[in-house]
Image (cartoon, rainbow, N blue to C red):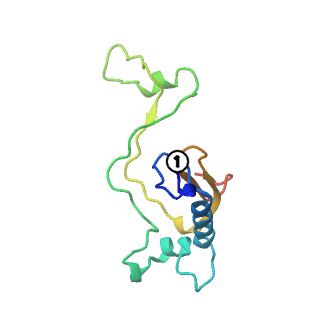
Amino acid sequence: MNSAQGGAVTASEPAGPITRVIISNLWKRTFDPDPENPLYLPRIIRDGYPEWGLSSYDPVTPGGTSPPVGIPRGPAGAGDSACARYDLEYPPVCSSPPALQPANILFTRLGVLRPVSLGFSGTDPVFTAVVGVGTAGAAC
């Protein structure tokens, strides 16, 4: 039985229309720069929010080492180059694409984020919120 019929909603159903409206309005409010808006996310990230016990998250350094991120579709031989070891007589041949495992990263200017998209799954109780930081043409 679903919520439209007055029964319980199971965890496998997609978000209903009321839930979508609530999340969509919260998403819009999160990026409303009105000085009276306590939910303006870029300001909370930049300045923190002492009333809620939140400190600034800009700049921030994540703790630990991130999991490896594979780099598929690289140029031929890139994996072998990444596996190169000069202490061996015969260099190893990689059996998988190269991967990066970032450590000691410092993120800055996270408060300059902007909303990109908000989407809802048609089959699961999931929504995806995408934000952008920087521009597509920014140099790394």
Extreme residue toward the right, this view: 137
Q: Circle 1 is placed at which residue position?
A: 13
- Residue at 56% from the left image edge and 55% from the top image edge: 5
The image quarter in which residue 74 lies: top right
Give how far across and how far down residue 83 sits, in percent: 41, 25
- Foreground residue among 38 and 62: 38
| Residue 1 sits above or below residue 26 on the image | above
- 41 or 108: nearer the eye? 41
Q: Is residue 110 left or right of residue 31?
A: left
Question: Image check: 48 left or right of 3?
Answer: left
- Answer yes or no: is residue 109 visible: no
Element marked by disc 1 = loop
Considering depth in this image, is 117 or 76 the residue closer to the camera?
A: 117
Task: Give me the residue at 39% from left, 74% from top.
Answer: 55
The residue sitting at 52% across, 64% down in the picture is 110
For the view shown, which residue lies furthest in the top direction? Answer: 90
Residue projecting furthest to the bottom: 36
| Residue 93 in sight in this render | yes
Find residue 79 and report its horizontal and vertical position in percent.
48, 24
Residue type (three-letter) at the residue carrying disc 1: Glu
Residue 43 position in % (x across, y down): 53, 75
Image-based side of 2 in relation to 137, left or right:
left
